[in-house]
Image (spheres, rainbow, N blue to C red):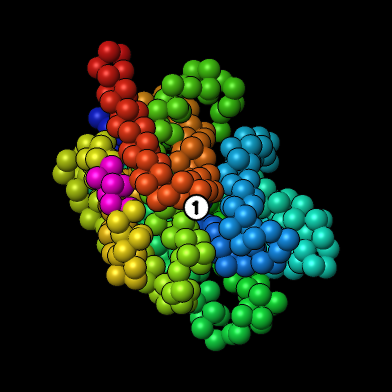
Amino acid sequence: MTSSYVYAGNDSVGVNPGRNEHDDTSIAPGEIATGVVIGRASEYFDFFVYAIASVLVFPSVFFPFEQKLEGTLYAFLVFSFAFIARPFGTVAFMAIQRHFGREAKLTTALFLLGLSTAGIAFLPTYEHLGFTAIVLLSLLRIGQGIALGGSWDGLPSLLALNAPESKRGWYAMLGQLGAPLGFSIAAGLFAFLLANLSSTDFLEWGWRYPFYVAFAINVVALFARLRLVSTNEYARLLEERELQPTDVTELIRSQGRNVLIGALAALASYALFHVVTVFPLSWISLYSERSMSEFLVIQIVGAAIAAVGIVVSGLIADRFGRRTTLGVLACFVAVFSGFVPLMMDGGDFGQTVFILLGFALLGLSYGQAAGAVTANFQTRFRYTGAALTSDLAWLAGAGFAPLVALGLSAHFGLAYVSLYLLSGAAGSLAALSLNRALEIRD
């Protein structure tokens, strides 16, 4: 899920000077942006369908032998498997692209994603299959992670490099709009099902429908992206920008420092990502009498606010710089973290304020979170480096966030969620400072 952008910084990599603006066969940044938004929205929808089900469904369906808290923690553990598998998917599918081409790679990856997602809809429950059902759920979740790693198409990097130099922040945020869009559709589906089905019907069969929808959306997104990726103009632009797969071993040996800094630079945004989307659902489900369908509607409103924040982040970044924007917003995340216990323990009003403020801050920070320091990559490493940096950023910042946040808050108190967010903000500031110091020294 997700997306990583190669920020050109001061490189002379603006719009191709040899490109004819009136040539109907050339690909404009707007066309690339459309492909990015469609691709990311479909991936985020899959992502949030699984995430929401991890709270509302899986503890009862796959872990009924445990108390609800422990069942949710087990579900979050399985949730993390995709983030662990994702870098391996990137490495494997880069090899497929080198041997069989971009179209074969993208088609295989998205069909694997769709089949893994739809497969969950057909899974027998623990009651019918026992521990084997949990094993199958885990394998399908790993399949989702591998597929997400393989679905990297290079469009975000190409978009950033072909965007006008004064609009790089604006174009960088476009792919991030897939997150609130995907969340809103997924949350809306679950809210509708919860409001119109009995608890028994929802847990027996209703929860499976969003996974069917996810498969259908993947098919549509596949053809939309292939329509662009398979063109000769797209291939030419990739070759001009040297956006081709490289050997991962060579990448790590030559650019390992940049991969590490890039993965940690947006740690605050990725940690906040799950603390305002998945974690509150689990907390409300366990410790509140609020209607889950109504709470999902509040989160949908928050997602709309986040979308506005993402758009605004592009304007701010183009004025003040992406790394400066990330650093300032990491400080805001640190301040926000101090109020988590007050808001989450503040009843319905406090929890609603937490969601709306949290989503607003998420939009502003996440809008520029992907790849803001990957300008340090040598040109020939940018394609693979951007993909791997994104994978590791998700793993370090978000992969275990629901598990850690719920586990800490349930056993030690909500103050530990504050410490978790604060550590993410500190990690971002440290990585951005180190990146700046190394740039000056180099």
Whether residue 336 can be seen here? yes
Residue 418 at x, y percent in the picture: 35, 45
Left or right: residue 196 compared with residue 173: right
Figure quadrant of residue 47: bottom right
Q: How crowded is mark 1: few (under 14 residues within 10 Å), some or many (20 or more)?
A: some
Residue 243 vs residue 109, the one in the foreground: 109
- Residue at 47% across / 61% down in the picture? 283
Task: State the quadrant of the C terminus.
Answer: top left
The range drawn in magenta is 334-340
The type of residue carrying mark 1 is Ala
Residue furthest to the front in view is 412
Q: Main secondary structure of the magenta part?
A: helix
Q: Is residue 379 magenta?
A: no
Q: How many marks?
A: 1
- Residue at 34% across / 40% down in the picture? 422
Left or right: residue 315 compared with residue 126: left
- Residue at 40% across / 51% down in the picture? 414
Residue 408 vs residue 159, the one in the foreground: 408
Left or right: residue 274 compared with residue 345: right
Residue 110 at x, y percent in the picture: 62, 55
Indicate the secondary structure of the residue bearing disc 1: helix
- Residue at 80% across / 56% down in the picture? 131
Q: Is residue 339 magenta?
A: yes
Residue 281 vs residue 318, the one in the foreground: 281
Q: Vertical placement of 132 versus 203: above or below?
A: above
Q: Vertical placement of 407 versus 67: above or below?
A: above
Whether residue 387 can be seen here? no
Residue 223 at x, y percent in the picture: 57, 62
Disc 1: which residue: 410
Figure quadrant of residue 363: bottom left
Residue 178 vs residue 171, the one in the foreground: 178
Residue 105 at x, y percent in the picture: 64, 46
